[in-house]
Amino acid sequence: NILEHHKRFTDKTLNHIVYIDKELWDSPDDALKQKILSDAEKNKNKVIVVYDSATGEKNVIRQPSNSQSLDFETVEVISRDNIIPSADLKNKYLDFSKQHGWKESSNSVFRVNTAEGYEALNLKSNGKNKYNIILSIGEDKVTKDAANALFEKHPDTSIIATLDEQGKLVFPKGKAFTPDSSVRINIVGHPEVLEQVGATKLADYTDQLARHYKID
Protein backbone atom coordinates (compact mmCIF):
# COMPACT_ATOMS: atom_id res chain seq x y z
CA ASN A 1 0.00 0.00 0.00
CA ILE A 2 1.57 3.25 -1.17
CA LEU A 3 0.07 5.32 1.66
CA GLU A 4 1.41 2.93 4.33
CA HIS A 5 4.86 2.93 2.70
CA HIS A 6 4.78 6.72 2.64
CA LYS A 7 3.81 6.99 6.32
CA ARG A 8 6.66 4.69 7.33
CA PHE A 9 9.23 6.53 5.31
CA THR A 10 8.35 10.11 6.22
CA ASP A 11 9.22 10.89 9.80
CA LYS A 12 7.57 14.13 10.97
CA THR A 13 10.92 15.51 12.10
CA LEU A 14 12.80 14.74 8.87
CA ASN A 15 13.02 17.20 5.99
CA HIS A 16 11.42 15.41 3.04
CA ILE A 17 11.01 15.92 -0.72
CA VAL A 18 8.22 13.94 -2.36
CA TYR A 19 7.72 13.60 -6.13
CA ILE A 20 4.30 12.13 -6.89
CA ASP A 21 2.78 10.93 -10.16
CA LYS A 22 0.09 13.38 -11.38
CA GLU A 23 -2.48 10.60 -11.87
CA LEU A 24 -2.05 9.47 -8.25
CA TRP A 25 -2.24 13.08 -7.04
CA ASP A 26 -5.48 13.69 -8.97
CA SER A 27 -6.99 10.32 -8.03
CA PRO A 28 -10.59 10.34 -6.67
CA ASP A 29 -9.27 8.43 -3.63
CA ASP A 30 -7.39 11.37 -2.18
CA ALA A 31 -6.25 9.87 1.17
CA LEU A 32 -2.61 9.95 0.05
CA LYS A 33 -2.91 13.54 -1.20
CA GLN A 34 -4.55 14.72 2.04
CA LYS A 35 -1.91 12.99 4.19
CA ILE A 36 0.94 14.58 2.22
CA LEU A 37 -0.69 18.03 2.28
CA SER A 38 -1.50 17.90 6.00
CA ASP A 39 2.07 16.84 6.88
CA ALA A 40 3.45 19.69 4.78
CA GLU A 41 1.08 22.14 6.45
CA LYS A 42 1.84 20.99 9.99
CA ASN A 43 5.57 20.42 9.87
CA LYS A 44 6.76 23.06 7.39
CA ASN A 45 9.64 20.79 6.32
CA LYS A 46 8.19 18.99 3.29
CA VAL A 47 8.48 19.81 -0.42
CA ILE A 48 5.76 18.43 -2.74
CA VAL A 49 6.36 18.10 -6.49
CA VAL A 50 3.78 16.62 -8.88
CA TYR A 51 5.20 15.11 -12.08
CA ASP A 52 3.63 13.97 -15.34
CA SER A 53 5.09 10.56 -16.20
CA ALA A 54 4.19 11.00 -19.89
CA THR A 55 5.81 14.41 -20.46
CA GLY A 56 8.28 14.56 -17.56
CA GLU A 57 6.90 17.98 -16.55
CA LYS A 58 7.25 18.76 -12.83
CA ASN A 59 5.29 21.31 -10.79
CA VAL A 60 6.13 22.42 -7.25
CA ILE A 61 2.89 22.27 -5.26
CA ARG A 62 4.22 23.20 -1.84
CA GLN A 63 7.58 24.15 -0.33
CA PRO A 64 8.53 25.72 3.00
CA SER A 65 9.56 29.38 2.86
CA ASN A 66 13.01 28.37 4.14
CA SER A 67 13.41 25.38 1.79
CA GLN A 68 16.79 26.59 0.50
CA SER A 69 18.27 26.56 4.00
CA LEU A 70 17.09 23.00 4.84
CA ASP A 71 19.09 19.77 4.42
CA PHE A 72 16.71 17.09 3.12
CA GLU A 73 17.15 13.65 4.68
CA THR A 74 14.65 11.72 2.58
CA VAL A 75 13.69 11.92 -1.11
CA GLU A 76 10.71 9.86 -2.28
CA VAL A 77 9.32 9.21 -5.76
CA ILE A 78 5.73 7.89 -5.65
CA SER A 79 4.98 6.10 -8.91
CA ARG A 80 2.09 4.15 -10.43
CA ASP A 81 4.59 2.00 -12.28
CA ASN A 82 6.86 -0.53 -10.63
CA ILE A 83 10.14 1.17 -11.41
CA ILE A 84 13.49 0.15 -9.96
CA PRO A 85 15.62 2.96 -8.55
CA SER A 86 18.58 3.68 -10.81
CA ALA A 87 21.33 6.26 -10.91
CA ASP A 88 19.74 7.92 -13.95
CA LEU A 89 16.36 8.09 -12.25
CA LYS A 90 17.87 9.41 -9.04
CA ASN A 91 19.92 12.04 -10.87
CA LYS A 92 16.87 13.20 -12.83
CA TYR A 93 15.05 14.08 -9.62
CA LEU A 94 18.08 15.35 -7.73
CA ASP A 95 18.94 17.67 -10.63
CA PHE A 96 15.47 19.19 -10.31
CA SER A 97 16.07 19.61 -6.57
CA LYS A 98 19.40 21.34 -7.22
CA GLN A 99 17.77 23.75 -9.68
CA HIS A 100 15.51 24.87 -6.82
CA GLY A 101 18.34 25.11 -4.29
CA TRP A 102 17.14 22.13 -2.21
CA LYS A 103 20.14 20.46 -0.58
CA GLU A 104 20.44 16.77 0.33
CA SER A 105 21.88 15.90 3.72
CA SER A 106 25.12 13.90 3.67
CA ASN A 107 23.32 10.66 4.59
CA SER A 108 20.07 11.17 2.70
CA VAL A 109 18.05 8.18 1.48
CA PHE A 110 16.37 8.06 -1.94
CA ARG A 111 13.52 5.62 -2.45
CA VAL A 112 10.84 4.76 -4.96
CA ASN A 113 7.38 4.02 -3.56
CA THR A 114 5.11 1.84 -5.72
CA ALA A 115 2.25 -0.57 -5.09
CA GLU A 116 4.68 -3.52 -5.11
CA GLY A 117 5.06 -5.62 -1.95
CA TYR A 118 8.75 -4.85 -1.58
CA GLU A 119 11.04 -1.85 -1.66
CA ALA A 120 14.35 -1.25 -3.34
CA LEU A 121 16.33 1.49 -1.64
CA ASN A 122 19.10 3.02 -3.73
CA LEU A 123 21.62 4.10 -1.10
CA LYS A 124 24.72 4.70 -3.17
CA SER A 125 25.34 5.31 -6.81
CA ASN A 126 27.78 7.12 -9.02
CA GLY A 127 28.45 7.24 -12.74
CA LYS A 128 26.64 4.85 -15.06
CA ASN A 129 26.63 1.97 -12.58
CA LYS A 130 28.31 -0.85 -14.47
CA TYR A 131 28.20 -2.93 -11.28
CA ASN A 132 25.31 -3.78 -8.97
CA ILE A 133 25.49 -4.85 -5.34
CA ILE A 134 22.13 -6.11 -4.10
CA LEU A 135 21.51 -6.65 -0.40
CA SER A 136 18.48 -8.90 0.08
CA ILE A 137 16.94 -8.55 3.55
CA GLY A 138 14.29 -11.15 4.37
CA GLU A 139 13.67 -14.84 3.75
CA ASP A 140 10.29 -14.52 2.03
CA LYS A 141 9.73 -15.41 -1.62
CA VAL A 142 8.68 -11.89 -2.72
CA THR A 143 11.93 -10.35 -1.48
CA LYS A 144 14.09 -13.15 -2.92
CA ASP A 145 12.32 -12.93 -6.29
CA ALA A 146 12.74 -9.14 -6.35
CA ALA A 147 16.46 -9.43 -5.58
CA ASN A 148 16.88 -12.13 -8.24
CA ALA A 149 15.02 -10.02 -10.82
CA LEU A 150 17.49 -7.18 -10.20
CA PHE A 151 20.41 -9.63 -10.41
CA GLU A 152 19.22 -11.19 -13.67
CA LYS A 153 19.24 -7.82 -15.44
CA HIS A 154 23.06 -7.79 -15.32
CA PRO A 155 24.18 -11.18 -13.95
CA ASP A 156 27.82 -10.77 -15.04
CA THR A 157 28.28 -7.53 -13.11
CA SER A 158 25.99 -8.09 -10.11
CA ILE A 159 26.15 -9.91 -6.79
CA ILE A 160 23.57 -10.60 -4.08
CA ALA A 161 24.58 -10.29 -0.42
CA THR A 162 22.33 -11.44 2.43
CA LEU A 163 22.21 -11.33 6.24
CA ASP A 164 22.74 -14.20 8.67
CA GLU A 165 20.55 -14.84 11.73
CA GLN A 166 22.63 -12.38 13.76
CA GLY A 167 22.10 -9.65 11.17
CA LYS A 168 25.67 -9.83 9.86
CA LEU A 169 26.46 -9.47 6.18
CA VAL A 170 27.03 -12.67 4.19
CA PHE A 171 28.95 -12.19 0.94
CA PRO A 172 28.61 -14.60 -2.01
CA LYS A 173 31.40 -17.16 -2.17
CA GLY A 174 33.31 -18.35 -5.21
CA LYS A 175 32.55 -15.39 -7.44
CA ALA A 176 35.26 -12.86 -8.29
CA PHE A 177 33.69 -9.42 -8.03
CA THR A 178 35.95 -6.39 -8.30
CA PRO A 179 33.82 -3.36 -9.13
CA ASP A 180 35.29 0.04 -9.90
CA SER A 181 33.72 3.22 -8.54
CA SER A 182 30.85 2.89 -11.04
CA VAL A 183 28.59 0.90 -8.73
CA ARG A 184 25.06 0.92 -7.37
CA ILE A 185 24.04 -0.52 -4.01
CA ASN A 186 20.39 -1.60 -3.78
CA ILE A 187 18.74 -2.88 -0.61
CA VAL A 188 15.65 -5.00 -1.21
CA GLY A 189 13.12 -6.02 1.44
CA HIS A 190 9.61 -5.59 2.80
CA PRO A 191 8.91 -2.09 4.18
CA GLU A 192 8.14 -3.53 7.63
CA VAL A 193 11.43 -5.44 7.69
CA LEU A 194 13.48 -2.46 6.54
CA GLU A 195 11.74 -0.30 9.13
CA GLN A 196 12.75 -2.75 11.88
CA VAL A 197 16.35 -2.73 10.65
CA GLY A 198 16.32 1.07 10.76
CA ALA A 199 17.95 3.77 8.63
CA THR A 200 21.15 3.88 10.70
CA LYS A 201 21.79 0.14 10.29
CA LEU A 202 20.97 0.27 6.57
CA ALA A 203 23.55 3.04 6.15
CA ASP A 204 26.02 0.92 8.14
CA TYR A 205 25.45 -2.06 5.81
CA THR A 206 26.06 0.26 2.85
CA ASP A 207 29.37 1.39 4.36
CA GLN A 208 30.41 -2.23 5.06
CA LEU A 209 29.62 -3.26 1.48
CA ALA A 210 31.59 -0.30 0.13
CA ARG A 211 34.59 -1.19 2.32
CA HIS A 212 34.43 -4.92 1.51
CA TYR A 213 34.46 -4.30 -2.23
CA LYS A 214 36.85 -1.33 -1.94
CA ILE A 215 34.45 1.16 -3.49
CA ASP A 216 35.33 4.84 -3.32
Image (cartoon, grey):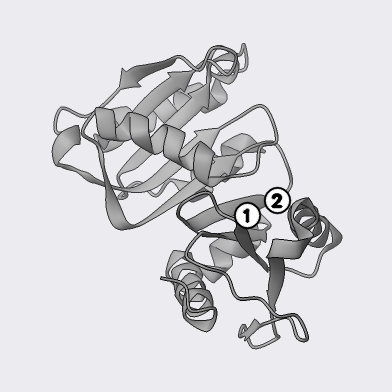
- Height in image: 104 above or below 216? above
Give whichever of 46, 134 is nearer the camera: 134
Instruction: Look at the numbered discs 1 and 2 and tell me whether their residues touch, using CB distance below 8 Å.
Output: yes
Give whichever of 49, 54 is nearer the camera: 54
The residue carrying pointer 2 sits among few (fewer than 14), some (14 to 19) or many (20 or more) residues within 10 Å by Cα, namely many
Q: Amino acid at mark 2?
A: Tyr
Q: Position of residue 123 (x, y in %)?
A: 49, 58
Closer to the N terminus: mark 1 or mark 2? 2
Q: Quadrant of residue 45?
A: top left
- Height in image: 16 above or below 8? above
Q: Amino acid at mark 1?
A: Pro
Q: Position of 89 compared to 154: left or right?
A: left
Give whichever of 31, 131 is nearer the camera: 131
Identify the residue shown where x is 70% and y is 75%.
Answer: 162
Q: Which mark is residue 191?
A: 1
The residue carrying pointer 1 sits among few (fewer than 14), some (14 to 19) or many (20 or more) residues within 10 Å by Cα, namely some
> Judging from the image, what secondary structure is the residue with disc 1 in?
helix
Identify the residue shown where x is 53% and y is 53%.
Answer: 122
Q: Position of residue 7 (x, y in %)?
A: 50, 43
Q: Position of residue 153 (x, y in %)?
A: 76, 51
Q: What's the distance in space between the residues labelled 1 and 2, CA to CA?
A: 6 Å
- The quadrant of the rendering that contains the N terminus is top right
Identify the residue shown where x is 35% and y is 29%.
Answer: 96
Q: Position of 69 compared to 130: left or right?
A: left
User: Which residue was labeled with disc 2?
Assistant: 118
- The quadrant of the rendering that contains the C terminus is bottom left
> Judging from the image, what secondary structure is the residue with disc 2 in?
loop
Q: Position of 195 compared to 137: left or right?
A: left
